[in-house]
Image: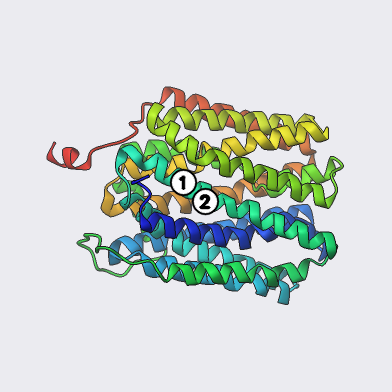
Amino acid sequence: MRYITRTVWILSIVSLLTDTASEMLYPVMPIYLKSIGFSILLIGILEGLAEATAGLSKGYFGHLSDLSGRRVPFVQLGYALSALSKPLMAVFQYPLWVFFARTLDRFGKGIRTGARDAMLSDEARPQSKGKVFGFHRSMDTVGAVLGPSLALLYLTYHPQDYRTLFFIAFLPGLAAVLASLRLRDHRRVETSETRTVSIFGFLKYWKLSPAEYRKLATGLLVFTLFNSSDVFLLLQARQSGLEDSLVIGVYIFYNLVFALFAFPMGILADRVGLKKVLIIGLTLFAAVYYGMAFLTNLYFIFGLFFLYGIYAAATEGISKAWISNITDPKDTATAIGTFAGLQSICTLVASSLTGFLWFHFNTRIAFFTIAVATLLVIVYFLIMPIPERIDQRQKAEA
């Protein structure tokens, strides 16, 4: 696999370790938050605000990375802050401090995302972007299998001892920081700007970006407006009768499917087209939410999480590969960061909206609304002509 370079390997291993730490806590997070007094509505707001904070920092630091011509410092700092946030969640239990610690983790993700994805893009050709981003997502999601598995093993012997898990999660996070020290900026990214960047400066890119980028981002952002946190799926599984251990188990199963299919989906996307694979993923997403609205049988729930894993494999890495293929290489971090920033703001709306519909109506109304909205997004992608790659040199000459 010559397209999997040393840099891609290091970034993938760092992501694997970080996700092991983060995902060790994710499936128990809603249970832990409820145990310290958070309502379902407040959980939705907390998750949405944390993601919105991450989103704004993704745009800002992605743009700053492009202007500075450097990638590695942003990657290293971002992973360091995420590692530090884990023990803080155990130390602070008051809602305001929990919000601070949770936001610090997302802030770290915001700092590193644009620069990291730009490094991945720089290591690939347009014809192999699906493979490279798919491989990275696959390795990243292996951590999402290991993390909950370790959490389940620990809770088997220490039931409801959630606080200790936050301290344990610091160890793989620290290992990720140490591994990131082996990264090097191979070359400076060409840039003609050196001015100071404002926190919302990256939004100017939306006006300056290619029309193809805006068309693609618009469809993905409308989808995000209804794609709430996975916490709600886990809560629904819990309310359907699954015990805590099975809730963690179904989340491990989902991530295992995601990890196994992400790389093959990337290979498939390079062969048959990024758009086709993305639409397949969105169709599966709609089916999952429709099913979760009406099905409560244990076997059906595992089946739906299987489809949910394939959906994630067919969309997350593919969307980034598509964005990087239709934007100028010197603007890659800004393009991905701008999209991620707007995406996280939409996630705030999505999680809050789902929490509101769940709280004031019921689960079926919330999930059915999400499924219908996704079908409309699929129609948009079917009728909207968006190229899957643009040769920037030919475009400039034209």
Amino acid type, callout 2: Met
Q: Is residue 200 left or right of residue 344?
A: left
Closest to the observer, 75 or 212: 75
Q: Is residue 203 visible?
A: no
Q: Which mark is residue 67?
A: none
Q: CA distance from mark 2 to mark 1?
A: 6 Å
Q: Residue lying farthest front?
A: 1
Question: What number is the disc on residue 139?
Answer: 2
Image coordinates of residue 28 in percent, x first then y, are: 75, 57
Residue 342, position as x, y percentages in the image: 48, 50
Q: Residue at x 27, y 47 (%)?
A: 328
Q: How is the image coloured?
A: rainbow
Q: Tell which of 282 and 119 is nearer to you.
A: 119
List x then y, in percent, for residue 22: 62, 61
Quadrant position of residue 390: top left
**As rendered, which of 298 and 190 lies closer to the eye?**
298
The local secondary structure at tag 1 comes to helix
Dots 2 and 1: beta carbons under 8 Å? yes
- Label 1: how many residues lie within 10 Å, few (<14), some (14-19) or many (20+)? many
SS type, badge 2: helix
Disc number placed over residue 135 in the picture, else none: 1
**Residue 257 image offset from top left, x and y in percent:** 62, 40
